[in-house]
Image: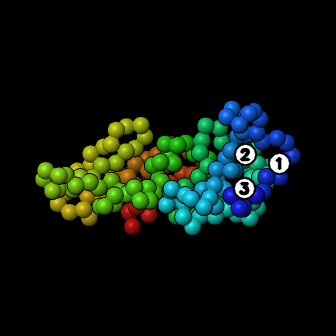
Amino acid sequence: MIYGFGINNATYKVCIGARNDRIFCPFYERWREMIRRCYAKTNKYPTYRDCSVHPDWKYFMNFRSWMMFQDWQGKQLDKDILYPGNKIYSPDTCCFVSGELNLLVGDKGSAKGRFGSGVFQCRKTGKYLARCKVRQENHKHIGTFSTPEEANQAYRSYKAEQILKISREGLPTDIAAGLMRHAAALLN
């Protein structure tokens, strides 16, 4: 059992090498990490709390069969780009996306800070700053506001606009549709 849930039913060796110099099968690495996020007893990432894996993916070879037909190289497995707020890893809800895109729509969980994502208070003036990081750019300063609510609204509007812009850049249809759902959720 992997993390008390997963079953490695591989028909081949998923790992070669000595203890400190192991090389894992890339399919197995992704599957094991997904299982860890959901079922490890200690999880330092609150965004994975209450997440689960579809029963079909309990078995490594089922996950591997799905992953073989995905565009996965150099990308991250994501469970909630297609459906914002989704907590289940499954063949119908998962896709592979760039790390950059994953970070853009990701929920920062406890890292959101005291005033919510993208909002910071200036120590000197007491005003609230809104800023957002998109792609490899530095954080973009969106504006300075009197209240954290105004700053948060500006952040959400800007981020939704950036997500919509990226959704029109020739991405697969399902991912573009998922991004549009993320943008709509930010605006509501």
Relative placement, left or right, of 47 versus 1 is left
Q: Kindly identify which numbered label has been placed on residue 102.
A: none
In front: 83, or 59? Answer: 59
In front: 155, or 126? Answer: 126
Q: Of the two numbered discs 2 and 3 on the same chain, state the one appearing first in sequence.
A: 3
Picture quarter with the C terminus? bottom left
Rounded to the nearest angstrom, the CA distance separating label 3 from label 1 is: 13 Å
Q: Are marks 1 and 2 in contact (CB under 8 Å)?
A: yes
Q: Which residue is mark 1?
A: 10
In the structure shown, which secondary structural element does the residue marked by tag 2 occupy?
helix
Q: Which residue is mark 3?
A: 2
30 w.r.t. 154: above or below? above
Structural crowding at the residue carrying mark 1, measured as other residues with C-alpha within 10 Å and reported as few (<14), some (14–19) or many (≥20): few
**Amino acid of disc 1:** Ala
**Amino acid of disc 3:** Ile
In front: 106, or 171? Answer: 106
Picture quarter with the N terminus? bottom right
Q: Residue at x 66, y 56 (%)?
A: 35
Rounded to the nearest angstrom, the CA distance separating label 2 from label 3 is: 11 Å
**Amino acid of disc 2:** Tyr
Q: Residue at x 47, y 53 (%)?
A: 105
Q: Which residue is mark 2?
A: 28
Q: Residue at x 77, y 35 (%)?
A: 16
How far across and down, in percent of the image, does residue 111 sit? 39, 55
Structural crowding at the residue carrying mark 2, measured as other residues with C-alpha within 10 Å and reported as few (<14), some (14–19) or many (≥20): some
